[in-house]
Structures are given as C-alpha cells and as structure tokens.
Amino acid sequence: MVTMQSWMFLSSFEGMRTKLLEDRSISTMAHLGARAFSEISGEVVQTTAFVLQPWHVTGFRPVFSRLVDGNEPAKAEALRTGQSRFDATAQDDFKKIPGCPVAYWADKAIIDLFDGCKLMKDVAMPRQGMATTNNDLFVRLWTEVDGRKLNLCATSQTDARESGAKWFPYNKGGEFRRWYGNNRFVVNYENSGQTICDYIDNTPGVKVKSNGRVINRDKYFKECITWSKISSGAPAFRYIPIGFAFDVAGTSIFSTKHEQILKNLGFCNSRVVTNILKFLSPTLNYEVGHIASLPIVADAMDAISEAKVTQLIEIARIDWDQFEQSWGFTESPIVKYRLAGSLSSGFEIYKTQLDDLHAEAASIEDEVNQSIERSLNLSGRISAESETIERFVHEAEKDAESQRLISYMVGCMMGRYSLDAPGLIYAHAGNEGFDPGRYTSFPADDDGIVPITDEAWFDDDGANRIREFVRVVWGEDTEAENMAWLAESLGSKASESADDTVRRYLSRDFYKDHLQTYKKRPIYWLFSSGKHKAFEALVYLHRYNAGTLSRMRMEYVVPLQSRMQARIDNLDQDIHSSTSSAEQKRFQKQKDKLIKQLDELRRFDENLRHYADQRITLDLDDGVKVNYGKFGDLLAEVKAVTGKKGD
C-alpha cells in the first residue's frame, strides 16, 4: 500500500495501529515523507509505502527505509543503494511505547525505557489551560495595559481576586526558548475570570461552555513547567514561577514539590527527551498526551542536579531580562556599563558577559545531559541529530544592540524609563500621575511627543535628544567618539555625519524595528503626515490624553508650516542670487522637496485638527489593536497594527 504517513503516529489512528501491530506483520516499508512524487510539491503530502503480511509473527523484525529527506530521485537512489536502512527493531517493541507509534528508527535502548517504567503522568500533572474563545478580547501584551491594573505575582485564586487587579500573566507558548522566558502576555482574569465565563456562556453557537473552557483553575498561579505546543524544531521547556494563568497553547506540568519541578524540567530539556519526542510526535505538535507519556526512570531523575537546573533557569532569566519586552528589564545593558567610559567599551564588556553566560549554559546543559545518559546506559547512543541543543542566550550583535539602545533612549525621552532609577517608571494611562521629578539626569519630554523629522526643525526632536543622552551618560569628552560608534553600528553612509545617520535611522527604520519588537502592538505610536515625511512624531501610548493631538498641532505642526514657508522663501532668494548653475539646481531641488512637504503638511494639519477637536480618549483595556484604529490615517502602519486600513 501507499498511504499518508499519519496512521504511523497520530493519536487518532491509535486504535487502528494497535490492531494492525497485533494482527499483522509489516514486512517492508519505505517511509517516503514529503516530495516523494515530483507531481506533488510542498510539505503537506507525506507518504509511506509498505507491505503487510496477513498474520502476526512474534519477534519479527521488519525492514524499514527512512527516505524522508530529498526529492523523488534522491529517495529512489537511497532506496536502491540501501541507505538509511533500519532492521534491528522488532515490531512487537512498538507496543511498549504509549500510543504504539511505528518508531522504527528509535534506538532499542530508548524504546526499552518504556518497558515497565512510570510515565510523566504518574509522577506529575500535565494539564491544558483555558481557552478564552476570543483572545482579541481577553489577552494583551503586558506592555499594552495600564500598569496599575496589572498583578504579576498573585499566589492563588483568592489572592488574585482580592487584589482587585484585572490583568494577570498568561502563559501561552511562544517561540523556541528553554529554561525561562517568553513571558509577554496577560489575560483579563478579573474576579476569577467572570467576564470570560459570561462571554463564553452567552455567545450563540459556542457548544462548550465556560466550565469546559476555563479549566484546571486550581492550577492557576502555581509554579510549573511549560512548553509550546507547536514547534518548528526541538521542544523547549521553561520554568514558570508563581503568578500565571495558562492557555490551551501554554500547556503545563505541575508538581507538589519545587524539587520535583526542577528534576522534571532538567529531564524534559534533555537530549533523551528530544530524541523520544521525535517519534512520540514527529509532526512537532507537542500535545499534553505526548508529554504525559514520557518515561520516568528513577535512576535518571536521581542523576539530575537540582542546583544545576536552578543555575540554567537563572541564566535564562538574566538573558530574558536584557530585553525591554521583559517586565524584569531594568536598563539598557550597554548603559549599565557606562563607567567603562565609552559606548564601545560598554558594548564589549556586555558582549564578553554574554559569551561567558553562553559558555556556562552550554557546559551545565552538557553536564545534565551526560548525567542522564550515564544513568540510562545511553552514553554515545543518542542520535547525532539530537545532540545539538539550541541555546537560549542571545548573541550580542553590534547592530541589534545599538537598535535596542536607541529604543531605551526613546523610552527615557518618553518617561517610560529613567536614568535615575532602574526598571519601569511610568506605564499608567492618560498621563495621570506622571512625575517629572523622577527624571533629573535626563529629563523626560514634557508632553510625550517626540518629533523624528528628517531635518532638525525642533530643538527637542529625537535625534537631538539622542545626542543629549549620549552626552549625559558618557560625558562631553567622549561625545564625538560615542556618536561615531553609534552611527557606525546603525549603518552610516560615507557622506553622513553621525547626527545625520541617527536622524535617518529614526525617520526610516526605528518604527519598523519597534513594530517587530512589540509584535505589532507598539507603545510608541508614529503620527505621520505621509510619504514625503514632512512631519512625523512618536507619542507614548501611556501618556496620550485627550489634549495630545491639540498640543501636537499647536506646538509642532502649525509652527513647522511657517518655518517651511520661510525656508522656501530663502531658497527663492538663493536661486536668484546664485551665479552657479549647479548651485541653482541644488537649491531648486531643495525647494521642490519642501514645496511637496509643505503641501503634505497642510493636508495633515487639516486632518489633525479634525481629530484634535474630537478630543479622543483611549481605554487601554481595549488593547493597541482597537485604540490604534481610532485615528484614521494620522498614524503610520495602520494596516499592520489593526489588520485593516484606517477609516
């Protein structure tokens, strides 16, 4: 037969698979995978060709050919030459594995781990979390909401309810990351999730009501292990401290003892488990059932050092907190080493620190793996493809770190951060409770509006304030050197000054990077006049209020029109007085650009006045996606953020 490969692995075929293995014998199989037929491209159609004997032969060892790589000619050649042939495993051994997957390529010693041992579900509690049924309504990035409504450390359902908070950390998977991290989301679990439950119970067409959706509540806010259900590669397990609810995609493992959580985490992130999950779930969709079926051998668990796992969690936490996406972020790591005297020195110290962390993590991971493998007599038997475990410590690249530094500088301008105190300073709403006295070394902007125009029209624009920041942090003596380093790391051009490079980056690239960093839920919003970039300004979401647009218009947009017109008039005089045709062309080019920008700016002013008169207010509980759409085409990248064009 030639069939899809699904029956070999998926839980929905377990009954059929079990009966086949009991009543029939696989004689030979060519496991073809994707691209087995030149007429069918892509990864969706994955096939296997096999011959069955109509009876069961005890102890029979089928011949398998693993041909999942390459295209049709490559597979045919591999089959003819006997490459990737597996014939050492008896068919009956597949029945030792929960779910009976046809894991013909697995080492027999790995398969034998399942023989008579306990499973993860016997020693811990793998659980699925809630399904809100509408994450757009109930889930936010933590950076979107009013920080006064956020509780990051609730210890129980009662504690969460009595705190009066609305938003709580929400574990919902994320990209590959081991040991710790991906803590980005919060969920509206006010009053024990009453709003979510009411929504589910009162929404027509929802067959499964809240008692089947908001499940395992007794596990909310408890420490646990989590993993991402869907992965493009190796599984990645992380430690989750107290304070989190969890999602159906942020499935979790609970234990009654902290020590057991550490041991389970060390085991789950091991090469042995990575190898096992390759046949428990070859589709890279790691369900609760797969994790619940992991074999737990006492010798292996005893071999895992809780202290070493704790070290790995701490290293991963240190690494995660280097990013401002983390609520544990305190300051730019380059600024942290300001006493080194220069930007370049601070960066080199930081890079060295990260390299040391990387090396330490690699060494500890290898020690944990070797201890497990020795205890199971598997030393040297783990397949090569499982031996490379991706590290969680990011590399310090000069361009990326300079972009993060610029983002931190903008945060200091906005009042989100301060050079005078670590961590988040202001993330409330409507500019309420904003205290300028907390920003002595480097004053926060008066109104949370920072122009980033392509020319220096304003003294307090973004580029000028970046130079001021560099001067304040590293001193006047090294100001030129530090600005040159910053410009070079941002990709300076030969004809540019350092200030020109910074200005160009802010005008053209900063917002693209910001959207990527904050997953298209920006906290600094870019108001833009249009493609000619006559006027652009960043506004801090948490400081926006009903008067922000009027202030933007009167403080910046209206004065800029007068300045542009005056510049055009001066260029007219320069053109008439110049005797050089080349100079006249240069002046004319500048004038033409300004005329287009002034025309764009006047149209923008009319539109801005219309919205300013409405005195629009924001409800941060609604999230960036909803609030961003309230300003029509005044904002840049409306479609990217809201999913539709502004109207």
Image (cartoon, helix red, strand yellow):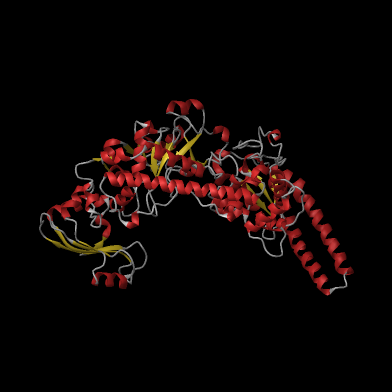
Q: Is residue 404 at least partly visible in the picture?
A: no
Q: Nearer the viewer, residue 282 or 542?
A: 282
Question: What residue is drawn where x is 66% and y is 34%?
Answer: 432
* Residue drawn at point x = 28 percent, y = 65 percent: 67
Q: Is residue 489 in sight in this rendering?
A: yes
> Which quadrant of the view contains residue 291?
top left
Q: Quadrant of residue 221?
A: top left
Left or right relative to 180: residue 642? right
The spot of residue 165 in percent (x, y) is: 52, 30
Residue 61 as seen in the image, left or right of residue 317? left
Q: Quadrant of the N terminus?
A: bottom left
Q: Viewed as shown, does residue 220 lie left or right of 144?
A: left
Image location of residue 36, percent across then percent down:
30, 68
* Residue 575, horizontal then vertical, whole percent: 85, 68
In the picture, measured across the screen, residue 197 lies left or right of residue 482, that is left
Closer to us: 19 or 183: 183
Count the labels in the image: 0
Q: Is residue 66 above or below residue 447?
A: below
In this view, 599 is above or below 171: below
Q: Which is nearer the eye, 98 or 561?
A: 98
